[in-house]
Image (tube, rainbow, N blue to C red):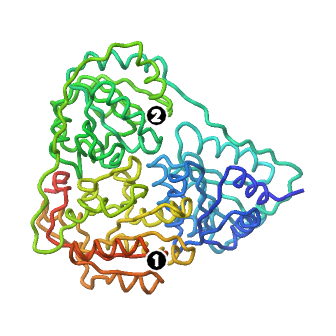
């Protein structure tokens, strides 16, 4: 006879999970202690939301299941933002929350997770692909099997189980858990319709989204583009799907993009969309009269396919990499059209500012880092500066969420990725606004020897909100910090090594030094407050 907590911990170990992230509390204690007993390393966070982001970073880095947990009540509600972020990014994360003992249901309880106060199973339903309260031990195996099959299935994403204290400790004579096996899912009939559309097109365009990196389909993207000589642009979240200097790459489009890529959007008669929902962040500069005649969209989730553009749409569902491999395997039987696409400089000049320009920092930053590094970029104007200016050399090494766009998510994700790959250089760019939300996770990294390099862009304001409000309303209410933070001093108080940089030379020196240290490092970057971020064309008229 073994407990439900035993079976849970054993399953996670059998799935290859090595680290779990969360904050312990009474109602989740039996499960967490068993995870430790079964050899999983527990990384205690400073806020449950960051622990959820860390689990997402772990899942992204490994391709395996990420695990985040919290106690009942507010511990669980603090995980909700991270769950929605994982759903928006198709990351397989198991969120586990505690619950008062079922035998005590109906009595007022501290940190209640039941329908009498904060029903966590209900709250997590819209933020995950599956959420359920485990009411009895003999239901646990069925529910865990179902949750894992969804999280690790074709349309990957987060799932949630709320497990009461007494269910965690309930003894079971047996509990059969089936480890899901990857299963290719191909849209064969629709795949066979792609080549005729490409051959008929005069100006085809590949739009690479973040799904390329999620599926690790960088080689397949290159083969498709090179076989037909089709230009490639990237969405804000798809930045890094292809190396910045590839002759067929024409830069990022949309918010944070360059005008050239937006021009290509408006001139193409066929979009081949790889792993993108085509949100407003991507299509903000596409004119309605310039929608393409045809759209081929690779997306495991059909929610928005065929509903955004007026184009005739061919939907390719299933795993992006599997579908592209099948498609490319039939290439040799087909004649390929001859097209000429000349490589060009798609960039615009750097700004000339009296103080340090963030665009200038990002333009040369990748030259200061090894090829094998991963950069996690937080949300805000600094994120879109990075989308526009950072020169990605290794495909898949740039991580940015422009869709759900949680401030502070990159801090936790970088920590989770470092736990998964301790030998890789992991860098996080965040802003002073994000850092004041979840910057205490620096101490999580310090305490667990997860030596991430954090770059905090401090312009002493909520820059993206300020510039957007100022342009559209003439007001900047709530966007300035009357007492700006000293990120370096704050980082030092949390145990990190800290630097302040006000010039390019100071930043280069700090980043080079940070890579020689075997410690968590924070570089506070003091940039020009008047620098205009590449987000101004996405505005809202409130008049």
> At 12% across and 62% down in the image, what residue appears?
351
Which residue was labeled with disc 1? 440
In terms of image quadrants, where is residue 389? bottom left
448, 372: nearer the viewer: 372
Tell me which numbered mark, 1 or 2, is placed earlier along the sequence.
2
Which residue was labeled with disc 2? 320
> At 37% across and 40% down in the image, what residue appears?
276
In terms of image quadrants, where is residue 374? bottom left
Disc 2 packing (10 Å; few <14; some 14–19; many ≥20):
many
Q: Position of residue 50 (x, y in %)?
A: 49, 67
> At 13% across and 52% down in the image, what residue appears?
348
Disc 1 packing (10 Å; few <14; some 14–19; many ≥20):
some
Q: Position of residue 468 (x, y in %)?
A: 18, 61
Secondary structure type for disc 2: helix
Quarter of the picture containing the C terminus is: bottom left
> At 63% across and 59% down in the image, what residue appears?
96
Left or right side of 406 for 536: left
């Amino acid at each position: 006879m073994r407990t439900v907590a035993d079976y849970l911990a054993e399953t996670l170990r059998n799935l290859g999970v090595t680290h779990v992230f969360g904050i312990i509390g009474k109602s989740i204690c039996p499960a967490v202690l068993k995870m430790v007993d079964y050899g999983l390393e527990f990384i205690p966070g400073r806020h449950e939301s960051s622990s959820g982001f860390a689990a997402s970073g772990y899942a992204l880095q490994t391709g395996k299941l990420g695990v985040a947990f919290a106690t009942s009540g507010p511990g669980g509600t603090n995980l909700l933002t991270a769950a929605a972020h994982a759903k928006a990014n198709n990351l397989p994360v198991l969120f586990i929350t505690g619950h008062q003992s079922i035998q005590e249901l109906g009595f007022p309880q501290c940190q209640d997770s039941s329908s009498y106060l904060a029903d966590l199973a209900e709250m997590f339903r819209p933020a995950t692909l599956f959420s359920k309260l485990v009411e009895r031990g003999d239901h646990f195996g069925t529910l865990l099997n179902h949750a894992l099959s969804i999280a690790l299935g074709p349309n990957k994403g987060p799932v949630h189980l709320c497990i009461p204290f007494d269910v965690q400790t309930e003894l079971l004579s047996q509990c059969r858990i089936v480890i899901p096996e990857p299963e290719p899912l191909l849209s064969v009939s629709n795949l066979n319709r792609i080549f005729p559309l490409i051959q008929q097109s005069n100006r085809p365009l590949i739009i690479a989204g973040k799904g390329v990196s999620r599926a690790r389909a960088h080689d397949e993207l290159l083969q498709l583009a090179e076989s037909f000589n089709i230009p490639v642009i990237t969405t804000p979240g798809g930045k890094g799907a292809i190396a910045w200097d590839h002759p067929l790459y024409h830069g990022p489009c949309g918010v944070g993009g360059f005008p050239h890529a937006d021009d290509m959007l408006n001139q193409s008669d066929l979009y081949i969309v790889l792993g993108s929902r085509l949100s407003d962040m991507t299509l903000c500069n596409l004119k309605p009269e310039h929608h393409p005649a045809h759209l081929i969209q690779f997306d495991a989730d059909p929610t928005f396919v065929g509903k955004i553009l007026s184009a005739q749409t061919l939907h390719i569902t299933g795993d992006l990499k599997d579908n592209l491999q099948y498609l490319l395997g039939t290439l040799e039987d087909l004649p390929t059209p001859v097209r000429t696409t000349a490589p060009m400089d798609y960039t615009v000049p750097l700004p000339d500012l009296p103080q340090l320009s963030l665009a200038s920092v990002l333009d040369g930053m990748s030259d200061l880092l090894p090829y094998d590094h991963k950069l996690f970029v937080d949300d805000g104007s600094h994120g879109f500066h990075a989308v526009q200016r950072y020169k990605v050399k290794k495909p898949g090494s740039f991580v940015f969420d422009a869709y759900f766009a949680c401030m502070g998510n990159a801090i936790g994700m970088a920590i989770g990725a470092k736990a998964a790959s301790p030998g890789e250089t992991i860098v996080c760019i965040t802003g002073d606004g994000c850092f004041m939300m979840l910057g205490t996770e620096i101490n999580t990294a310090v305490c667990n020897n997860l030596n991430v390099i954090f770059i905090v862009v401090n312009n002493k304001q909520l820059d993206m909100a300020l510039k957007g409000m100022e342009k559209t309303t003439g007001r900047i209410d709530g966007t300035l910090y009357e007492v700006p933070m000293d990120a370096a001093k704050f980082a030092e108080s949390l145990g990190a090594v800290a630097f302040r940089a006000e010039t390019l030379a100071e930043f280069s020196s700090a980043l080079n030094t940070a890579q020689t240290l075997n410690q968590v490092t924070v570089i506070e970057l003091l940039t020009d407050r008047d620098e205009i971020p590449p987000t101004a064309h996405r505005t809202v008229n409130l008049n």
